[in-house]
Image: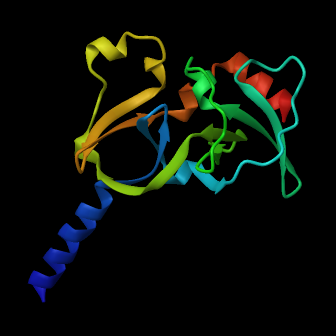
Amino acid sequence: MQYATGRAGSKEATLASLQQLVTFELFGEIFALPILDVREIIRPTAITPVPQAPAFVEGVINLRGQIIPVVDLRKRFGIAAETATDDTRIIVVDLSGQMVIGLIVDSVREVERIPMDTITPPPALVAGSVGAEYIKGISNHEDKMIVHIDMRKVFNPEEMGALAAAG
């Protein structure tokens, strides 16, 4: 009996060391967000433009009565936007209860369980580059390089205000 308790304890420790992430593609690379930040994933819908919004804000959508600003992550990361395909999705993200936004991505892959100890800080060369402040870490999982995004750092306070005004 004591042996079984010990095994269950180590299994719980193993499960606790796994992070569940929603993985998605953007400009041919794989990115990840913690599953707890993701409210839902939807197909693109009609987006209403918002005058004077930042260039990366496509506009707003009405999602079951809630007006949500929609951001094109390609534009936010300084990459040219592309035409939507059948795989394009909007990931609806809750930013710590402060705001709900939609993120346009090229495609959503799957939910991955990644061991926490495989997530490493970005290399120094990457850490000093533009946009590196958004990167929480990088992992190599099942022969896939995954860039972990910190959504709380993707937008500065002024941009958060603009997003709130758009929504």
Q: Quadrant of residue 73?
A: top right
Of the pair 98 and 35, the residue shown nearer to us: 35
- Residue at the far bottom in the pictured view: 1
Q: Is residue 128 left or right of residue 25?
A: left
Viewed as shown, does residue 79 lie left or right of 1? right
The percent coordinates of residue 139 (x first, y second) are: 28, 39
Q: Position of residue 34 (x, y in %)?
A: 47, 48
Quarter that holds the N terminus: bottom left
* Residue 163 vertical position relative to residue 99 in the rendered view, above or below: above
Instruction: Identify whether 109 is placed above or below 77.
Output: below
* Left or right relative to 5: residue 33: right
Q: Position of residue 66 (x, y in %)?
A: 85, 50
Give the camera-side residue of 85 and 14.
85
What residue appears at the point 63 percent right and 44 percent down from the top-left corner?
A: 85
Q: Nearer the viewer, residue 132 or 108?
A: 108
Residue occupying image coordinates x 58% and y 40%: 105
Q: Quadrant of residue 113?
A: bottom left
Is the residue 160 above or below the residue 108 in the image? above
Q: Going by the image, does 151 lie left or right of 114?
A: right
Tell me where residue 141 appears, x and y as whole percent: 26, 47
Q: Residue drawn at (46%, 52%), measured in percent from left and top?
A: 109
Give the total number of marks visible in the rendering.
0
The colour scheme used here is: rainbow
Q: Quadrant of the C terminus?
A: top right
Residue under the image location 48 percent in, 17 percent down: 131
